[in-house]
Structure formats: structure tokens, C-alpha cells
Amino acid sequence: MMAGDETVRPRVLLIEDDEAIGQVLMDLLADEGFAVRWARHGREGLDVLARWLPRVILLDLMMPVMDGWAFRAAQRALAGPEAQVPVVVLSGAHEARARAASLDAAAVVTKPFDLDDLLATVHAALAVSPKA
Amino acid sequence: MRDAMRNPAAADPPGDQAAPAPLVSLSGLREVVEAFGRAQALEDFSRSALDALLRLPGVERAAILLRDPQGVMRFSAWHHLSDAYRNATEGFSPWAADDPAPQPLVVPDVDAEPRLAAHHATIRAEGIRSLAFVPLVAANELLGRFMLYGSEPGTFGEAEVMLAELIAGYMAPAIDRARVEARRIALLEKLPTGVLVAEVPSGRITIRNEAADRLLGASPAGSLTAASSFQALHPDGRPYMPEEWPLARASALGEVVVDEELVLRRADGERRTLLVSAAPVHDPTGRVMAAAATFHDVTELREAEAQQRAQARVLAQLVERTARLQALTARLSQSLSAAEWAEAAVREAMAALGAARGLVQLVSTDGAALETIAVADYGEEIERWARIPLDASLPGPDAVRARDLVCIGNRAELAARYPTVAHATRPDTQAWACIPLVADERAIGGMTLTFAEPQDFTTDDRAFMLAVARQCAQALVRAQLYEDSQRAIRARDEFLSIASHELRNPVAGIAATAQLLRRLQQRGPVDPTRLDRYVGLIEHGSKRLASLTDDLLDVARLQRGELPLRLQPVDLTALVRLTASLQDDDPLHDVLVDLTLEPCWVVADPDRLGQIVTNLLDNARKYSPAGGPIHIRLAADAGGVTLEVRDGGVGLPPDETERIFEPFGRASNAARQNIPGLGLGLYICRRIAEQHGGQLTAASAGEGQGTTVTLWLPREQGATDDGRG
């Protein structure tokens, strides 16, 4: 597949508190040739970001400890290339697109979602990612 | 003079100093004039004139007659005339009553005078042989006459008559003046205005009319200032000093006093208000010779004026208060919050009643206390009254409980009625008014006003307070309803947001898992462990969806009042153990169970009771995301059993222990932290507990301090610890 052609598998950081969605996306993205890390909330996401630079971030909005909005604000405030990583918002929130408007996301995917659409969105985000 | 020589009186030995000088000398004439000068009353004039007449040559007998008010000549003074003679001749006049210029009449021989024929016998009996009539005329009016009597015919000649006329010329104007004066005095006596005239410098009162007696009390005192039957006060209550009296000032200083108000307090306690005027009377040289004062009793007038002023004041107050009530009513249409409204109302009431400070309190949701909602012009000290138990013996709670005003006009009254709090009040507060706020027959709170001055609360004040309270109560109820509806709208929006998230996540999880399975299947046989895991995810997601759907259905049923219970004896201890054991795969939380009651029978619907226990345990885990122990304790009291579930988690903000039991009500801190939940579980559980006759409550020491949720269930009859097994 496209991603598999690369010598280094493209990295995706998944930040999601829902167990089922998390497991399914981990498996899906791994099957598709991505290197994936899964954080349960924004705080964990920032921890991962500190030592592992992804090409794309898949970000849920409503999460405990640190929600998607707080994570995005913290990420954009970072000094290094982490700040430039494109974010795909993944949300089941009421009026998710409107609520994600302030996040300057590469894309917004609403739950429930189609796996093929999601993969296409991730690849599109990968294309605009600085290392692409 | 010839005639004087015939006068036996003039035959006195010369050089006798005591004998009056004959009138026919200048000195005699001067004596007469001086006597007139000294005369004051009419009788004095008559006596002086008679003396003078008797000094005329040949005059041994004389009389003075004056016309009375009916015009009849009456003897005023006489010498050597018998009563019989006077009685017989009184009333006779040789002149017509309207004669404009009566002339003297000399009768040389009485017997020869036909006009006296009717009186001949009387005259002769009196030994009178000749007569002279000399008219007293002043201002063209016949005032009276002089009579000269001779014992011989032809006693009086032209000279005697002229001298008598001369005396008459002096006397007539004096009589006229005295009569005018007498009329003046009579008029003065009848005047409704009190009049006093005092001599200067003696201070002797020379005129004091009836009205003066009436006003000042019939004091015989010679001078007004010495009067002691009353006390004179200035309108401000200061007593008059003797030298301050208007009459004294007019006498001593020549001051003219116009309408000075003076209050007389009589010995009998009656108070009269007088208007006093005074003026000096100057003699021709400009010296003050007397002073006059008038007194006008204006007591009734002043009372009427005061009454009018009081009425005007009441009217003005009424107008102002009505305007304030209208202003309050106008604000009813504004969408103010309850607190804003309460402050507006208390400020209007303060302004209308002149209160220094005010506050509004509402009965708390549990009905146990009054809680402050608005404060006007108090300092920090008011915070100690922020919540007052409704059963406290304090003016505020008393007013609310009795649904009646509690007005305390001064500190002494406070000390008498509320001895325990008197010392705790601000020293600058002198009066209190506590007004119940009653809407639809229900006391929803109270307004308290405090005053910097002692108050005499009038009927109007009280009526106004009640009117403001009525407006305020209605507005507060409306504002509360509005706030409730706004809160309901916010809760609904929040619910939509939460429900969207809560429902979409499991649906998205199930859908994504199914799609993934389909993809794998298309590529060949699916690895059994992955298959197993995916089936588990789908099962878990559908259970969550089922549980959410159950909650929503329960809420719908509860709101329609349809949640039937299948009551039977349930061992709560066993139920708790079972529920806890079903969840013991949780590595984050240690569930510590303190169940000394074994068994613990209650009559309940086992499924619904299980729903409560499960929900409480789920919540304890969910709201302590960092993990930690969860304590479950079961205890019994006489009336029932208590199940307590305590966690060390996120806790509750102080005022949200009730909010979490409202439909879709979630603690603000939990929502902020995106801890999942629809906000329905506790609402459903409380309703279930209530349907069992029990209670479900929550307590927390604050955010981050954990939460304790307590279920209390009554022990139904027949369900005992050693009951059925």
C-alpha cells in the first residue's frame, strides 16, 4: 500500500478515550502500515509527543483529564516541529464541526465514521504534513 | 366783681389760704382748668365742674345733668338738692333734643316762667326762686347742662351765665372725649382680641379686656410678666424670660412686635397658641408713656394648619410610594435575575421608608433556612447572617414563619423581644422591620430593613411595606421561574451535547469494529483471537447502548409516573456483596465493604435496588478516575437502614449536592473534566429510593475531596433481620 512503500512507516498519534474505537483504529492503522501510538487523553498525548514525533494526529475532543481543545492549544504552543503536525479531529460531539472550528484542524471526522473515509482523510493529512 | 361781693362764700376773711380762690380770679380759673386736666373719668369731670360752679358769685346750689344713652337728662352731680326735687325735675329740658345750637336760659323769677309751670310747687318747696340753664354742647351735640339755683329772684346776671358757659366750654369736650373713651373701652372689652395696656415706667396695667382675661386666665396680676397662672413658651419650647415679653419689649425698648407666636401652658395643662403684637405709645415729647399689646388665640387655626400639613405630608408620601411601587411594577417586565430584582426592591423600600440598610433572604430549597440573595449597604458583618435557620427566634424568621410584619421601633423594644440578639446588632441601628415575602399564600422569604433612627411605624408605613413585599415576592417567583426555565434550557443543551457524545461513541465503536471485521474477512480467515476481541468490543458497546437506552426509558417512565415496583424481601447485604463481586476486575479501585448486618432485610424491588447499588458503585469508580479505595458501609437505625458509598474522587462543588439529582444534572467539575455520563443515573436512583419511601442524598467536602452518597430505606413491617431466608 501507499504507506508501506516508505522505508520508515509514517507515524500516527491517536488520542482517544473510547476503548472500542481506540482498539479498532490501532488495528486498522497498523494493518495499513502506520506506526501508531495510542494516548487515552490530551495529557498522555503531550507526553507521547515529547519523545515521539508523529506525521498526523487523530484527536478526539471530549476526553477526561485534558480534552481535545486543551491539547491542541498546548500542541500549537510547543517550540519544535511538534507544533506543525496536522490534526484530524475525530468527534461524536453535538455540532462537532462547529465546535472544532477554532482548532485549525486539517480535517474533522464525525462519529460514527466510515473506515475508508477515515483512511483517506489520514492520507490527505499526511500529504500536507511538513515531512511529506 | 359785683356779683362776687354778693357771694357769701367770698365774705370769708381775706388772707385765709385754705379758701379756694374765687373763680373770678385768674388763679381760680387756672385751678378749674387744672382739675379738668387731672380728671379721667366722667365723674371726675362732673365733680370738678360742680366745684367750679359753686365758686360763682351768688351760687349756693348747682347741679350738672348729663344725657344718658337714651337722651334723657340725668343728675350727674349736685349740691344742696333734695332727692324729691331731683326725682321730680329729672328729665326736664328747656331745649328740644335736636336743637342744633341751644342757648343759655336765665329764669330771674321762677314763678313768672310759664315753661316751669308744671314744676312751680316743687321748685318753691326747694326754696329756689331763680334759675339758669347752661347747655353743654360739643360737636353740635347737646351733652347735658349746668344748673344754677338762686334763693332770690334775679340772682344770676349775664356775667354769671358767661362764666358758667366758660366752664361748660371746658367741660363739654372733655365729657365728649370721656364718652368716646368709654365707648372705646366698652368696644375693647367686647373685642375677641385680648388687649393689655401698661403704663410706663410703672408697668401698671391700665387696660385689660375680657378676651385678655380669658386668654391669660383671669389673673389679677398687675403686670403680665408677673402672672403665674401660666407659663409662656416659644414655639420651640424655650420659656419666655420676663424681659422677652412683647409688652415688656415695647415698654422698655419701644419695640414694635408684630404677630409673635407664643405658647401658653396654663396651670391646668392646657396649651394655647397666641399671636402677640405690641407697640409703644409715645407722649408728645417722644417718650414712651405706655405700651399696648394684643393677643390673638390661634390654637384652633394652628391645629387645623398642622392637620392640613400632616394630611399633605401623608398625601405626598402616598404619591411618592405609589410612584415607587409603579416603578417596581414596571421592572417586573424586565428580565432581571432574582438577585437583581431583590436588590432593586429592597433599595426602593429603603428609599421610601428612609431605611439605612436592607437585605432580602429566600427560604432555602430544603425549607430549613433563610439564605441571603441581595444586600444593600451592609458591610462584611452581614455575612454571618447569610444563612439563618428558619426556626431561629429572630425577627426575620419570625416574620417569615408567621407571614406577618415584625417591626421593632427602638433598641429597648429589641432588648425586650429578642434579648439574646440585642448585643449582636450594629450599634448604629436603632430600628428594624422584617417583612415576609408571600406569593400564592406561601412565604418564600423575607426583606429586612434597618434604620439609623428609632421609628414610629405608622399604619401607612406598614401597608407600604406589605405592598412592596407583595410585588417583590411575585417578581422573585417570576424571576426564579425564569431562571429555572433558563437552567432547564441549559440542561437540555448540555444533555444534547452529552447524549450525542455518550451515544455516538458506542455506536461509532460498534460500527468501526464491524467494518474492520468485514475488511479482514474479505482478505481471508480472521485470526480467532482478534475475532474474539472484536466480538467482545461489539458486545460491550451494545451493553453500553442498552444501559443508556434503559436510563432514558426509565426517565421517560418516571416523568410519566410509571415505574412499577415488584416489592419483596431483599437481603441488602447479599445484594451489595453480589454487585461488588461482579465488578472486581477493576485494578484502580479497592472496594472496602463494612457489612456487619447479616442478613439485612428490606422490602424492595430487587432489580431496582440492584440498579441503585450498581449505579452508586459505578459512580464511585467513574468519579475517582485516579483510583483509590471505595468504602461501602451498611448501618441500621430504629426506622430503617443506611447504605453509604464513599469515594475519594473529584468531589462536588459546595452548592451542587442537589443539582446532581436533577434530570441531566451533572456536577460542573465532572462535566468540565469530560467524565462520561448522561446525568440521569442519580436522578433515576433517587426517584426509585423515594418510591420505596426512602431517601438518596450526597455530601462532599468540596472539589477533589471525594463524595459520599447515602441511601436510606425504611424497614417495612414484616421485613426483619431474622426474617425470611
Image: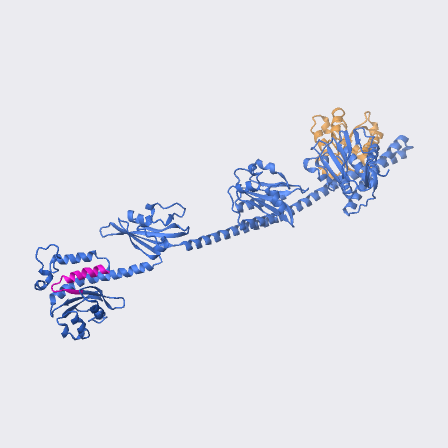
Chain colours: A orange, B blue
- B61 sits left or right of A69 in the view: left
The residue nearer to you, when weighing A79 against B172, is B172
Residue B651, how many percent across, how many down? 72, 33
Residue B693, how many percent across, how many down? 77, 43
Asked whether residue A42 is drawn in magenta, I would say no
Could you tell me which quadrant the N terminus of chain B lies in?
bottom left
- B466 sits left or right of B584 in the view: left
Give the residue drawn at x 38%, y 48%: B231
Residue range of the region highlighted in magenta in the rendering: B42-62
Give the residue drawn at x 42%, y 50%: B269
Q: Is residue B468 visible?
A: yes
From the viewer's perspective, is residue B145 above or below residue B283? below
Residue A63 lies in what quarter of the image? top right
Asked whether residue B58 is drawn in magenta, I would say yes
From the viewer's perspective, is residue B143 above or below residue A129? below
The residue nearer to you, when weighing B490 against B62, is B62
The residue nearer to you, when weighing B84 against B173, is B84
Looking at the image, the residue that sits furthest to the top is A51
The residue nearer to you, when weighing B150 against B544, is B150
Residue A87, how many percent across, how many down? 75, 32
Residue B710, how many percent across, how many down? 75, 36
- B197 sits left or right of A69 in the view: left
Could you tell me which quadrant the C terminus of chain B lies in?
top right
Residue B707 lies in what quarter of the image? top right
